[in-house]
Image: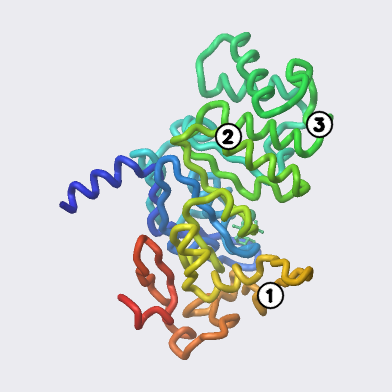
Amino acid sequence: MTDHKTEIQSESRLLTVSDLTVSFTTDDGSFIAADSISFHIEKGENVGLVGESGCGKSVTALSIPRLIPSPPGTIESGEIRFDGLDIMSMNSQQLQDIRGRAISMIFQEPLSALSPLHRIGRQMVETLLLHQEMPQKEAWQFAEQWLSKVGIPDAADRMFAYPFQLSGGMQQRIMIAMALMLAPKLIIADEPTTALDVTTQAQVFELIQAMKQKDTSMLLITHDMGVVWEMCERILVMYASQIVESGSREDIFSNPKHPYTIGLLNAIPRLTGGRTELKDIPGQVPSPFDYPKGCHFVKRCAFSMEKCITESPLFYECGNGHRAACFLLSGSSG
Ligand SMILES: Nc1ncnc2c1ncn2[C@@H]1O[C@H](COP(=O)(O)OP(=O)(O)OP(=O)(O)O)[C@@H](O)[C@H]1O
Ligand SMILES: [Mg+2]
């Protein structure tokens, strides 16, 4: 029975990250930015990765296609299995094949991904031809169609534009076209709309959702719990280099277990009687040079106990794949 279950799991699973640890070495010393991270993404699933600034969300995401700059970064350990392939053992050619084609990334800052020196059309065609054999002319037409698809008016003309000639929202649409045109299996979207106004943000998310194929998965990184609720079926909550809770969107929002998750949810702006109410989590994320020995959240936690200072909590299963790393749960299960 277990075998059968494993088989079904591996059929539907796109990504499994196990015990991933990433360190950085700087002039001030070394620190761990992602600590024993484990999670998975099913085919077609949208998974949200949330947490305050500096918690290691981008480091975790960049590790998947092995894009951590080295130096200063090092993937110390861990296993990354993507679509049946072992990413950690891939050579640079294999990694290049997979990046952009099977795994594509959408960043907060489109200009960091688009070259300022080249026209949009040329950049799109180069990306296409890097991963797919097709005549140049066909690639140009394909790219132009994608510009239209993502809502760029006068696509034929815009193919000749430089990125700086377009608005931030338009640049982001081009990034999305480039990320999706090769029908990737996994989209990693790291704060894809933070730089945009609220209306454009909503349009961009609608666009990603509409353009991605049904079995394409997404890892969406954001500070915005509202966006996660809209977009994701499952949520990973990260605090100070560690995943502290994960579960279905419903479990995380209606039955959060970790005090940090509860704090994040309380920090969502709510309109009560015409006033916006927002309760920040007291204190700040510690410096990675100064993570506590036990639970990393201990200094900000209203429920901390003696052993939280010295011992790291393991994950407690709360049912339906919902799990949280907090000693408060030690009485409830195992
Ligand atoms: N190239 C780098 N060199 C040195 N330290 C780095 C580098 N990239 C990330 N870090 C450090 O690793 C830690 C985790 O950073 P990361 O960028 O993953 O945070 P984040 O959760 O994505 O934050 P944000 O929400 O602000 O984007 C931080 O302390 C950060 O300063
Ligand atoms: Mg980040």
Residue position for label 3: 166
Q: Position of residue 288 (x, y in %)?
A: 59, 69
Calculate the distance from the C-alpha at mark 3 to the C-alpha at mark 1.
38 Å
Earlier sequence position, callout 3 versus callout 1: 3
Colouring style: rainbow
Q: Which mark is residue 102?
A: none
Residue located 81% across and 35% down the image: 167
Calculate the distance from the C-alpha at mark 2 to the C-alpha at mark 1.
34 Å
Q: Position of residue 311 (x, y in %)?
A: 42, 81
Residue located 46% across and 63% down the image: 251
Question: Disc 3 on helix, strand or loop?
Answer: loop
Question: Disc 1 on helix, strand or loop?
Answer: loop
Q: Dividing the picture into quarters, in which one does residue 180 lie?
A: top right
Calculate the distance from the C-alpha at mark 2 to the C-alpha at mark 3.
22 Å
Earlier sequence position, callout 2 versus callout 3: 3
The kind of residue on which mark 2 rests is: Ala
Does the beta carbon at disc 1 come under 8 Å from ligand 1? no
Does the beta carbon at disc 2 come under 8 Å from ligand 2? no
Q: Nearer the viewer, mark 3 or mark 1?
A: 1
Residue 119 makes an appearance in the image:
yes
Q: Position of residue 252 (x, y in %)?
A: 49, 64
Earlier sequence position, callout 2 versus callout 1: 2
Residue located 47% across and 80% down the image: 294
Residue position for label 1: 279
Residue position for label 2: 210
The kind of residue on which mark 3 rests is: Leu
